[in-house]
Image: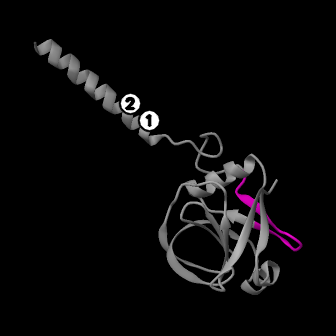
């Protein structure tokens, strides 16, 4: 009986150790080779206007966006909201990493897991940060995005 109990104790410990090892591993956008993505920048091409470059955040939401863009460009039909942002559906749900944050001009945000947002103003809310447009002011973004609806095409910056 003692041998049987010892055997089950060893099996249980081995099972726990294997679970802990598997729990510590996570698949990343670079094929599991580390937490850094191979390409952490994207392009945002505004229909009939400018193109901006953005640096992605280091979280599972931004990695999922990069993986989506690795399959092809994504065009987002965006509408103005509250004179501070443009928002539109990505067409796919991404993992959420919502935190209370303050946004500023150029922030790229995931809202409700499926809405892509470009801020040209400021806001404080519980949101998921995807990245930030490089070297653009709120005035430049508002000028490029316009007052009404706009189509923005997202692609990996190759």
Residue annotated with mark 1? 22
Pointer 1 with pointer 2, Cβ within 8 A: yes
Looking at the rendering, which quadrant does residue 75 occupy?
bottom right
Magenta-colored stretch includes residue 50: yes
With respect to residue 143, does 157 lie above or below? above
Question: Residue 48: x, y in percent?
Answer: 89, 72
Residue 18 tag number: 2
Q: Residue at x 64, y 39 (%)?
A: 31
What stretch of residues is rendered in magenta?
39-53
State the residue in front, 130 or 41: 130
Relative image position of residue 3 (x, y in whole percent): 15, 13
Give the spatial CA distance, label 1 vs label 2: 6 Å
At label 2, counting other C-alpha atoms closer than 10 Å, the crowd grade (few under 14, some 14-19, many 20 or more) is few
- In the image, what residue occupies the spot 70% across and 64% down? 55
* Residue 39 - label: none
Instruction: Judge whether residue 116 is colored magenta.
Output: no
Q: Residues within 10 Å of mark 1 (few under 14, many from 20)?
A: few
Could you tell me which residue is drawn at 73 percent across and 64 percent down? 76
Q: Is residue 120 left or right of residue 43?
A: left
Q: Is residue 99 left or right of residue 91?
A: left
Where is residue 39 drawn, in percent x and y? 72, 53
Q: Give the colour scheme shown.
A: one colour
Which structural element holds mark 2? helix
């Amino acid at each position: 009986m003692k041998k049987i109990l010892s055997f089950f104790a060893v099996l249980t410990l081995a099972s726990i150790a294997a679970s802990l090892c598997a729990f510590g591993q996570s698949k990343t956008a670079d094929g599991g080779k580390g937490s850094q993505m191979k390409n952490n920048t994207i392009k945002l091409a505004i229909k009939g206007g400018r193109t901006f470059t953005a640096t992605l955040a280091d979280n599972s939401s931004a990695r999922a966006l990069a993986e989506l863009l690795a399959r092809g460009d994504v065009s987002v039909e965006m509408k103005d909201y509250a004179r501070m942002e443009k928002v539109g559906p990505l067409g796919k749900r991404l993992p959420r990493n919502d935190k209370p944050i303050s946004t500023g001009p150029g922030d790229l945000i995931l809202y409700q897991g499926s809405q892509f947002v470009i801020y040209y103003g400021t806001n404080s809310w519980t949101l998921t940060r995807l990245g930030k447009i490089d070297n653009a002011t709120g005035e430049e973004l508002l000028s490029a995005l316009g007052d009404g609806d706009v189509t923005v095409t997202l692609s990996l910056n190759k």
